[in-house]
Image (tube, grey):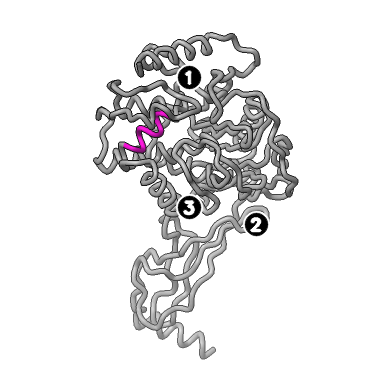
Amino acid sequence: MKRHTASLLSTIALLSIALPAIAAVPPHKGKPAGHAAKTASTPAIPAGPPPTAPLAVAGMAAPPLLPAQAAYVLMDAETGAVIAEKSPNLAWPPASLTKLMTAYLVYQAIAHGTLKLDQTVPVSDAAWHTGGSRMFISPGMTVTVDQLLHGLIIDSGNDAAVALAQAVAGSRASFVGLMNHEAAALHLTGTHYVNVDGLPDPTLRTTALDVALLSRAIVTKYPAYLKISVHKHYTFDKIRQRSWNPVLFRDPTVDGLKTGRTNEAGHCIDATSVRNNRRLIAVVLGGPSWVTSTNDIEALLDYGYQFYTDATVVSAGRIVGSMPVPDDQVTSIPVAAAHDVVMTVPTIAAKNFKTVVTYDTPPKTAIAKGATVGTITVSAEGKVIASVPAVAMASDQPAGFITRMERALKRAL
């Protein structure tokens, strides 16, 4: 009987996928509530402060307003710098953006060797009966971790989320505990999980900043996620489903990450793009439609790529000054940055850095090569953008007899 029910569901899914698109952005598949294309009132957008660009300098273009979004964050994936933000710490229902953490923990288990991509996972009744969007697994099926990850990321399958959670932790409750533990480890201070799939719950909350931080952790630690999220379709058990991510169909530079949709959450998109070898992450929460949220994601990405760049503001080993030393040592010691500093900076300031070295009081003992002797501060357009320890590039040596005599004579005169 179970198999017959699954077949009926499969037929329904195939029919829903075949429906023609009715908007410029490809619609989702008419799935049940939980990630549903269900007619509903738009969530109320709370009044809040206007968007800001934390790295901006004088003369910069203002960040996009995006009034239809409750919150947004635009982040540079390499540096972690927030380029633009609107209500970044506003508590908001994540809907299926919850599955970002589900996927993160699955990839973590694979990295630790407790789970394998080709490992077969049993499908429980709990997974089979999970509501909302589905990849349509059922008990008795042979399904692998890799297939479930595709169903989780592309189809946004709640059934896949439950099956994976049980494979990793034994139960959904135990997995939720792992989710909240990892959220704390990643400093997602505005996030609280109560389930593995994002189905509505009044205590399930996240923020735009936390979604961006988690997304950066995924693309940094587990880039294999993007090998799946880049796909526009996935076929399992002869059911071909379209990706929930509408930005994939608009922008060829986008290769992930996830979307979420409930009546309470609105149309939430977490997208990442690579242009000119630079990756940005854009998150919008609470949009009134997929079209609007897609347009707003594109506005954020365009703003970030046009007005900001990643620059090496200080290079390790490049001499930036000379430290004076006591008279009984050499005249000065060359200093440089302890390490490279790559920063996200406004494009208009990228070639106008000002570097200042502040020296510590010279020790009475000898200075060893590599010792910290001060601080290098980098500013642009009057705004400090980076500080890094200054280190000695050579050891000091005792001055020769003649040099010491010459110095003494100068002091006497």
Residue at mark 1 to residue at mark 2: CA–CA distance: 43 Å
Q: Which residues are magenta?
A: 159-166
Tag 1: residue type? Lys
Q: Nearer the viewer, residue 57 or 349?
A: 57
Quadrant the N terminus occupies: top left
Which of the numbered marks, if any, corresponds to residue 232? Answer: 1
Q: Nearer the viewer, mark 1 or mark 2?
A: 1
Residue at mark 1 to residue at mark 3: CA–CA distance: 37 Å
For mark 1, give the secondary structure.
loop
In this rendering, the answer to whether 359 lies above or below 386 is below
Q: Residue at x 56, y 28 (%)?
A: 33
Could you tell me residue 34's position as x and y percent?
A: 54, 31
Which of the numbered marks, if any, corresponds to residue 383? Answer: 2
Disc 3 target residue: 341
Q: Of helix, strand and loop, which mostly describes the magenta segment? A: helix
Could you tell me residue 208's position as x and y percent?
A: 58, 43
For mark 3, give the secondary structure.
strand
Could you tell me residue 56's position as x and y percent?
A: 67, 48
Q: Nearer the viewer, mark 1 or mark 3?
A: 1
